[in-house]
Image (spheres, rainbow, N blue to C red):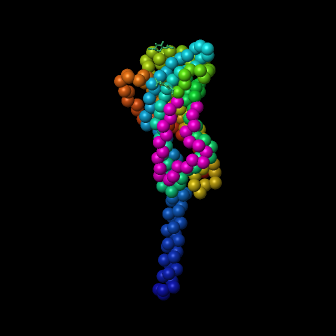
């Protein structure tokens, strides 16, 4: 084999290797993983005058992992978290802004403190108030946190909706009461809308 042929073969092998590495790095997409690693509910009260509302203090540690080793994500819309009780949304908070990036392989921890003094009306209805009384009797409250947003993966054209629900069981622990252990919760991602997401 001449010198020329061996150079050609080396180049072809190199090209194939580069294509393989790139298609492995960018072709195979892994979805983000979202968990609530810690949460504490220090106040939860049903207010009925002047309007039905929840007075509460909740703080969460929301963890978003990007398991891709070459693909970053960039938020194309603000990432929001909505808190619901008995199916009724009672608060909403921004988690990340439009334009925020999460690099490949990175884990980002968001600390979300939400509270209300009970002046924002919530349409709990009879059923919601009944659920509140029932859960209040045990001190264990079920709150669902729903994340919604839109983002883009590096080197991808499509914008992908992000939707995840985190069902939380929160033991009310006012300041000064014994600490309660929170069991980490995995948030459930909605099915991607298409194969590019
Ligand atoms: C709840 O939050 C409010 C406002 O952020 C704060 O003033 C209050 O002390 C908090 N109460 C509890 C019980 O954590
Ligand atoms: C919730 O429970 C607390 C203490 O157990 C009680 O004082 C309060 O009245 C209850 N609230 C409702 C709406 O049942």
Residue 49, quarter of picture:
top right
- Furthest toward the left, the residue is 178
Q: Residue at x 50, y 81 (%)?
A: 7
Residue 147 is situated, as x and y percent measured from the top left of the image, at 56, 37
Q: Up-down: is 96 above or below 85?
A: below
Regarding residue 161, the answer to whether it shows in the image is: no
Indicate the position of residue 179 as horizontal and vertical percent values: 37, 27
Magenta region includes residue 110: yes
Q: Residue at position x 52%, y 30% from top? A: 114
Q: Which range is magenta?
A: 92-114
Question: Residue 171: image x %, image y %?
Answer: 43, 24
**Residue closer to the observer: 177 or 159:** 177
Horizontally, residue 61 falls left or right of residue 190, namely left
Residue reaching furthest to the bottom? 2
Taking depth in this image into account, of 131 and 56 the one nearest to the observer is 56
In the image, residue 155 above or below residue 97: below
| Residue in the image at 51% along x and 76% along y | 11
* Residue located 57% across and 37% down the image: 94
Of the pair 54 and 16, the residue shown nearer to us? 54
**Count of numbered circles on the image:** 0
Residue 139: x and y, percent?
Answer: 44, 19
Task: Give yes or no for residue 81 being in the magenta stretch.
Answer: no
User: Taken as a whole, is the magenta stretch helix, strand or loop?
Assistant: strand
Is there any visible trace of residue 178 in the rendered image?
Answer: yes
Q: Is residue 66 above or below residue 35?
A: below
């Amino acid at each position: 084999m001449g010198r020329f042929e061996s150079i050609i073969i080396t180049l072809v092998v190199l090209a194939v290797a580069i294509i393989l590495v790139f298609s492995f790095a960018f072709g195979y997409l892994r979805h983000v993983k979202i968990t609530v690693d810690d949460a504490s509910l220090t106040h939860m009260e049903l207010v009925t005058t002047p309007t039905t509302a929840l007075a509460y203090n909740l703080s969460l540690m929301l963890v978003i992992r990007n398991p891709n080793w070459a693909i970053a994500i960039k938020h194309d819309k603000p990432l929001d978290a909505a808190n619901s009780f008995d199916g009724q949304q009672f608060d909403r908070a921004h988690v990340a802004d439009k334009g925020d990036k999460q690099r490949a392989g990175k884990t980002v921890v968001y600390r979300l403190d939400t509270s209300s003094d009970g002046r924002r009306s919530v349409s709990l209805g009879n059923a919601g108030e009944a659920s509140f009384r029932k859960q209040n009797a045990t001190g264990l409250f079920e709150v669902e946190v729903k994340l919604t947003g839109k983002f883009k993966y590096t080197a991808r054209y499509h914008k992908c909706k992000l939707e995840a629900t985190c069902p939380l069981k929160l033991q009310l622990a006012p300041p000064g009461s014994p600490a309660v252990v929170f069991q980490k919760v995995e948030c459930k991602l909605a099915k991607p809308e298409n194969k590019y997401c």
